[in-house]
């Protein structure tokens, strides 16, 4: 028995005995126990309820490519170069990179779990199975890297558009592209992250691999491991996140539409939406990194998506390096 099969059996949230699971899967109870431990080690909070057996604290939906595709408007479903759901990848973005030229435009990969999920600036992206979404999309562009400034900010807006369609409004953007929960009076926990990686020609055909990690359910252990305040869609939706396949469909549809909009209008088409969701606007900030360290007040972003910081002398300083840490002072 594979961990994916076991998780699928437990997905309904009903308790299942070790003996019952072993019978259903046609394996020994020891084999079930081993896979229960494997899933637990990966961060799945499987509870043991004495004679009643094993259960998840809540039901979950296993990702299903057919369901995700069925949830897309037909013209958008046809636009996809690929739509694949994997149980495990090192990283959905690394897999798209390996496919290189053979990957078609709008190829979308999802994985239930990543063994080497990557965040910005060399960080690891925790990717336990069954709880969250890990998705990468390849989009090709004709006009080179310069035309792509602001792309990662635009993707933040696209993800928020998807969340709004799902009825979730309590989220905003922290430059350059963190998705944070809105928690008045204190820094919001991180709901998701975006990693955009470019390859190709500086002034010609190039490709963007857009990786999105979205927290649907975080366990207390994951909150601790995250090493920074984190939040999940469950917390913004009265304790139950939207169906995972529906989140994937809505997100993919928003990505196809939004990336087409970016291709024709660039960041200009996203500036107003970004401003509406800009959590740093008017906030005292501490910045540090390749530019040294300095303080200022967040003053929105410019037409290319660079962060504008109002300095004490009233001047505006532009920050467009991704290698900068921005903190609310
Ligand atoms: C960040 O540091 O905030 C960006 C996190 C991006 C994580 C996603 S999960 C899907 C894709 N695959 C990866 O390895 N990383 C991105």
Image (cartoon, rainbow, N blue to C red):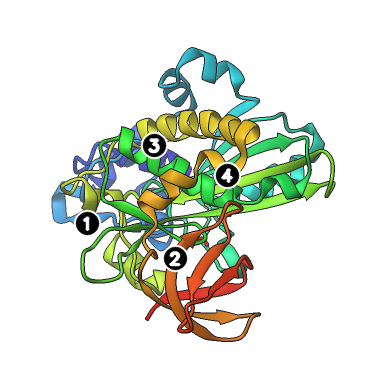
**Badge 1 residue CB within 8 Å of ligand 1:** no
Q: Distance from label 1 to label 2 (Cα)?
A: 51 Å
Which tag is nearer the camera, tag 4 or tag 1? 4
Q: Distance from label 3 to label 2 (Cα)?
A: 26 Å
Q: Secondary structure at mark 2?
A: strand
- Of callouts 4 and 3, the N-terminal one: 3
**Badge 3 residue CB within 8 Å of ligand 1:** no
Q: Which mark is residue 267?
A: 4
- Of callouts 4 and 2, the N-terminal one: 4
For the point 24% across and 41% down, the residue is: 59
Q: Which mark is residue 123?
A: none
Which residue is tagged 3?
Answer: 162
Which residue is tagged 1?
Answer: 48
Which residue is tagged 2?
Answer: 299
Percent position (x, y) of residue 26? Answer: 40, 35
Q: Is residue 55 left or right of residue 119?
A: left
The residue carrying pointer 2 sits among few (fewer than 14), some (14 to 19) or many (20 or more) residues within 10 Å by Cα, namely many
């Amino acid at each position: 028995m594979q961990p994916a099969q076991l998780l699928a059996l437990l997905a309904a949230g009903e308790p299942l005995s070790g003996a019952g699971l072993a019978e259903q899967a046609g394996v020994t109870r020891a084999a079930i126990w081993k896979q229960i431990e494997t899933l637990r080690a990966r961060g799945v909070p499987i509870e043991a309820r004495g004679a009643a057996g094993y259960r998840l604290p809540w039901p979950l939906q296993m990702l299903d490519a057919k369901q995700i595709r069925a949830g897309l408007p037909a013209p958008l479903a046809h636009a996809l170069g690929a739509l694949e759901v994997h149980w495990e990848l090192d990283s959905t973005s690394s897999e798209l990179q390996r496919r290189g030229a053979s990957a078609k435009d709008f190829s979308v990969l999802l994985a239930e779990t990543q063994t080497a999920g990557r965040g910005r600036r060399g960080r690891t992206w925790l990717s336990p199975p069954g709880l969250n979404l890990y998705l990468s999309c390849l989009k090709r562009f004709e006009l080179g890297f310069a035309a792509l400034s602001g792309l990662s900010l635009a993707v933040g807006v696209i993800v928020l558009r998807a969340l709004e369609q799902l009825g979730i409004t309590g989220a905003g953007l922290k430059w350059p592209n963190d998705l944070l929960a809105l928690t008045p009076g204190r820094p919001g926990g991180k709901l998701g992250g975006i990693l955009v990686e470019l390859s190709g020609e500086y002034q010609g055909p190039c490709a963007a691999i857009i990786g999105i990690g979205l927290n649907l359910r975080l366990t207390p252990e994951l909150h601790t491991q995250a090493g920074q305040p984190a939040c999940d869609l469950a917390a913004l939706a009265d304790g139950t996140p939207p169906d995972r396949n529906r989140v994937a469909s809505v997100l993919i549809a928003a990505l196809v539409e939004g990336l087409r909009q970016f291709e024709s209008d660039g960041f200009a088409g996203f500036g107003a939406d970004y401003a509406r969701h800009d959590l740093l606007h008017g906030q005292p900030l501490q910045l540090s990194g390749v530019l040294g360290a300095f303080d200022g007040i967040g003053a929105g972003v410019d037409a290319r998506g660079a962060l504008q910081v109002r300095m004490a002398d009233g001047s505006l300083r532009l920050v467009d390096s991704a290698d900068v840490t921005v903190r609310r002072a």
